[in-house]
Image (cartoon, grey):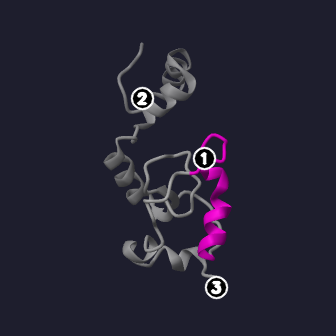
């Protein structure tokens, strides 16, 4: 397999970048918070480098953010990742994500320090 730089790879069509997917295969949960910790698996499988920054996302076509099955994962744009999340009903706003991760009291404290997080004011 020939190595392809991720900046070139992401320029391919979505159909090309998802041609390896096989959603009949079961999800594999290796462990950890979510499979972003295992981006190297996808990079190795596809022959790309691991993207840095936030412009290229590890997308889960299966909708399971803990899945590390390379047959369910693809490199995508932020917009494609959001679209997948919304289709699977797993998308959360920044407000919801922060609330889930830190709880109401920490969220309220963060809102006082930084202003709105895209949700209602808990004040």
Identity of the residue drawn at 46% across and 64% down: 76
Please name the residue that numbered disc 2 is placed on.
116
**Residue 87 located left or right of residue 18:** left
Q: How crowded is mark 1: few (under 14 residues within 10 Å), some or many (20 or more)?
A: some
Q: Name the residue under label 1.
A: 29
Q: Which of marks 2 and 1 is nearer the N terminus?
A: 1
Q: Residue at x 66, y 55 (%)?
A: 38
Magenta residues, as a range?
28-47
| The N terminus lies in quadrant | bottom right
Of 10 and 107, nearer the camera is 10
Give how far across and how far down residue 55 sits, in percent.
51, 61
Q: Earlier in the sequence, mark 3 or mark 2?
A: 3
Image mark for residue 13? none
Outermost bottom residue: 2
Residue 1: give its label.
3
Q: Where in the figure is residue 95, as x and y percent of width and height?
A: 43, 31
Residue 34 belongs to magenta span? yes
Q: Is residue 110 left or right of residue 37?
A: left
Q: In 3D space, how far apart are the residues under numbered discs 1 and 3 (Cα atoms)?
A: 26 Å
As drawn, the residue found furthest toward the left would be: 87
Dot 1: element: loop
Indicate which label's residue lies in the foreground, 3 or 2: 3
Is label 3 in contact with label 2 (beta carbons under 8 Å)?
no
> Distance of mark 3 from mark 2, alpha carbons?
48 Å
Name the main secondary structure of what is drawn in magenta: helix
Query: Does the stretch in magenta take in 56?
Result: no
């Amino acid at each position: 397999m020939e190595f392809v730089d991720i900046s070139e790879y992401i320029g391919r069509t979505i159909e090309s970048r998802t041609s390896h997917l096989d959603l009949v295969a079961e999800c594999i949960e290796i462990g950890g918070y979510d499979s972003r910790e295992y981006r190297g698996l996808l990079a190795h499988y596809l022959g790309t480098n691991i993207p840095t920054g936030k412009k290229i996302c590890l997308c889960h076509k299966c909708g399971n953010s803990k899945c590390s099955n390379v047959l369910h994962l693809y490199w995508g744009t932020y917009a494609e990742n959001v679209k997948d999340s919304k289709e699977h009903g797993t998308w959360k706003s920044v407000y919801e994500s922060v609330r889930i991760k830190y709880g109401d009291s920490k969220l309220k404290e963060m809102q006082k320090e930084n202003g709105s997080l895209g949700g209602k004011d808990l004040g």
